[in-house]
Image (cartoon, grey):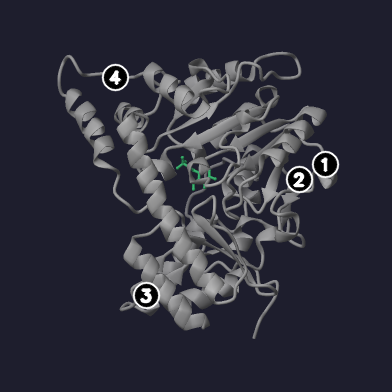
Amino acid sequence: LLRRNVKCRCIAEPVEMMQTVYKTKVSRNENMAKLQAGYLFPEIARRREVHMLKYPEAKVISLGIGDTTEPIPEVITSAMAERSYALSTVAGYSGYGAEQGEKNLRAAIAETYYGNLGIQETDIFVSDGAKCDISRLQILFGSNVMMAVQDPSYPAYVDSSVIMGQTGPFQKDVEKYGKIEYMKCTPENGFFPDLSTVSKTDIIFFCSPNNPTGSAATREQLVRLVQFARDNGSIIVYDSAYAMYISDDCPRSIFEIPGAKEVAIEISSFSKYAGFTGVRLGWTVIPKQLVFSDGFPVAKDFNRIVCTTFNGASNIAQAGGLECLSPQGLKAMHEVVGFYKENTDIVVDTFKSLGFKVYGGRNAPYAWVHFPGRSSWDVFEEILEKAHLVTTPGSGFGPAGEGFIRVSAFGHRENVLEASKRLKELYM
Ligand code: PLP
């Protein structure tokens, strides 16, 4: 039986309420109390554990969380090893580095990804990953701003906004937080929001290629987005963590759009390019031209936050990042990305051959598969129960994700092929 509107049911609470014998006098942060049912991926991990207890013999394959699986190319790990060994020498030792990142890495990022776009080395802030920078940006904006997000979107934007106190409580009837503008992205609008229906907000989080829909915005669409931000005096936070997966001529950076430097920040990461999800290295670009309403440069405030909350990315990780941007490192990263893109083709072809409508895939390592009229969590459970495959329920990314699942193409080739076989057995 197909059931609609079956919401996420927690199998176990993230932290059991303990029988306490002693309580502090500290009241809980009310914003934390607004957060719903735990973060999406821990919830999936819990369900996977329950499944594995039920079927200890099953070989569960994860196409869920979107973590990289392939080894980091050796040219890159060699550079990290060298830097690591050098730390054991008097000449090669270094302690705290610049909070904003090493000069040569900032220069290499500016040159490689923003070469002709007028972005300078000093506009780049090297970080321990895009997710951490999302929260640092929220600290920068504070609790008095209102933000817009694509619906569906990567959950960290909404959750960090809730934690900062920018939102109202969660409204169960619509599955949305108050005081967040959800920009619906569906097959009907080509996964780009109808900006004529979007209310003015201070901040617009925009991810392209989008996680989870896998859709990349075209140049013409981004021109409209930048114009929309300029008309409203908003700041766009553009997440380009998957830009290297773009196969067509969609822009790789928001700064390809004229006028974007006055209204946009870009966050990005080595995580999905070089398998750095565990190494941790990313960056944020804040052009000097971006200023607050009083004319104060946004980058200056961000610099203050970085210097206060962060002591710089690991020097070993930065050596790896620098090598990523060498000619041989770039070639190796393209091979890693190419491998996952082949996986994506296998996943997309599998679902298409079974008659499903599949979106994304072309410009991102995610297939966004439509199960019209069904609850995402039910589909998730069905695929886990019957094929021992972990996917991600679309509704976990926002209400417009209901009826979809996200299938990640990060996986060893034999696992992706095995997953394809099991899906064909399940849905043929
Ligand atoms: N942004 C998006 C859209 C992502 O999908 C992810 C990770 O999955 C991140 C940011 C986090 O990247 P990082 O590993 O650099 O923190």
Q: Residue at x 71, y 19 (%)?
A: 292
Tell me the residue that label 4 is attached to.
95
Q: Which mark is nearer the camera, 3 or 1? A: 1
* 30 and 166: which is toward the camera: 166
Q: Amino acid at mark 4?
A: Gly
Q: Residue at x 48, y 41 (%)?
A: 244
Q: Reply above or below: 102 against 250.
A: above
Left or right, 178 with reference to 343: right
Q: Decide which of tag 1 and tag 2 comes sooner along the chain.
A: 2
Check disc 1 and give the amino acid type: Ser
Cα separation between marks 4 and 1: 47 Å
Q: Which mark is residue 199?
A: 1
What residue is pinned by disc 3? 53
Label at residue 181: 2
Which numbered disc, 2 or 3, marks the residue that appears first in the sequence? 3
Tally of numbered discs = 4
Task: Look at the picture and state if 195 lies above or below 226.
Answer: below
